[in-house]
Amino acid sequence: MNEKKMPPCMLNCPAHINIGEVLNFIKQKKFLDAINLVKENLPLPASIARICPHPCEFKCTRNFKDGAINIHQIRIFLADMFLNKKFDFEIKENVEPQKKVCVIGAGPAGISCAYFLSLLGHKIFVFDQMSEPGGMLKYGVPEYRLPKKILNREINFFDELEIDFTGNMKVDKKKFNELKNKFDAIILAIGAWKAKKIKCVGEENFYNGIEFLRNIKVNKKKMEELVDGKKIAVIGGGNTAIDICRSAIRLNAKEVINIYRRTKNEMPAEISEINDAIDEGVIFKELLSPTKILLDDENKKILFMEKYKLGEKDFDGRASIIKTNEILTEKFDLIILAVGQDVEADFFEGEKNIDGTIKINDCFETSEKKIFCIGDAIRNKNRIAINAIADAKKVCEHVNNFLLGKELICKEEIADVKKNNSQVKNKFRSERLEMKKRKACERKKDFDEIILPWSEKEFLQEASRCLNCRGCKKNDCE
């Protein structure tokens, strides 16, 4: 098995985008070369740039000196340069006759599969339960983070690559069996759309968090009527919970309170999202967990919450929680539950894991012949779009080999960091340019995008901070 050596940013990117080379192209003002390099692994560069948590920045060698390169906003600026331009798609001609592949699910994983397999010369048919492609990107992520018009522009390649899309189709067992008989291969990219529940008396009085975000996209006026002037509680500490809090603020809620069983420091949500929520007026109440909901005579919801304290770290590295036997109560007009999502795949009769995710091998094959699965349907954590897209790139290679009757090589090459090709300690200091955002007092009034664009000068200045490194030891970087 070969071992790949990568710079630390590239290694920590789930899609293994060659970020250093992208920045190198930008420094030379070869912007088309830069975006083409991104699109080799990422068919939705402008959309994903906006919502990706950018794990690449955590491993940037500049962290040892003066702050990681702001890859987040560099990628947004670069991708936006090409939003309205058409790309030339180089479709590979297969020796074998063109194969028909069905992709179930049109979220980031499914869209990416359609893209990569189309370029390999296959005919792709995509089916989704919603009316338009986009999945959670379109029906879950609020517009202030990812404007619909940007996502729609990036999905235009469906027409150019002649990808067949069918919406408003919920796949059941009967339909799934029909698809199995019709297609040469099927990729399940169904995501995780089923809201988790908690053990709480009166849980029927919770509003489903996923439905809350989806309904804003489908009927915003109706949701404004539901929320306007109301006192809202949001249960949960992930990015979805924070999205709900900030969306409720924009729907003119009187008060939005986030309730979480640990503290903000242990929240799985991105720290930047939490800080933005605080700036916009969301109130955080920590170390509380719901136990019961009662309705009063005015149909107000009385939420009973058990108080916790933090204990030792658990197997995930987060502090455990310890009951204090103290119960607090508070009244709300609406309580929204957002504590995670489960996979809903009753139509699939193959092997599943205990948590309901679909069981696969190293080639993303399920226990059913010619059925592959990727994305949120195969994992119960780290459910971020860039992971789903990384899956798509890998599975398409396996599916292509399967369709052409070739052996499926299921073990990945080992990736490691290239060491000490450059030292930081002798480099000049160059402070990181931070993300530009609209003021909280303005942005919380609407769903317009909160990120403000850089100038080209700022864009080039930040890209120039890249050290073209291949990793370095900490003592070389001080």
Image: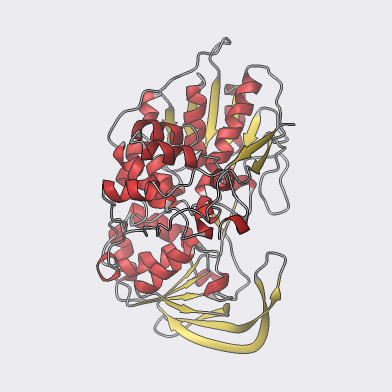
Q: Which residue is at the front of the view, 164 or 31?
A: 31
Residue 343 located left or right of residue 87: right
Asked which colour scheme the image uses, the reply is secondary structure
Q: Is residue 141 visible?
A: yes
Q: Which residue is at the front of the view, 368 or 89?
A: 89
- When the figure is inspected, residue 239 is found, relative to residue 288, above or below; the finding is above
- Tell me residue 54's x, y (percent): 49, 52
Residue at left 42%, top 42%? Answer: 134
- When the figure is inspected, residue 123 is found, relative to residue 296, above or below; the finding is above
| Quadrant housing the C terminus | bottom right
Looking at the image, how many numbered discs can be counted on the residues? 0
- When the figure is inspected, residue 159 is found, relative to residue 153, above or below; the finding is above
Residue 197 located left or right of residue 300: right
Q: Residue furthest front?
A: 426
Q: Is residue 190 visible?
A: no
Q: Which residue is at the front of the view, 381 or 358?
A: 381
Q: Which residue is at the front of the view, 251 or 272?
A: 272
Name the image quarter holding residue 291. bottom right
- Tell me residue 431's x, y (percent): 40, 60
- Tell me residue 327's x, y (percent): 59, 88
Residue 360 located left or right of residue 24: right
| Quadrant housing the N terminus | top right
Residue at left 50%, top 28%? Answer: 116
- When the figure is inspected, residue 339 is found, relative to residue 377, above or below; the finding is below
- Tell me residue 396's x, y (percent): 58, 29
Residue at left 58%, top 11%? Answer: 96
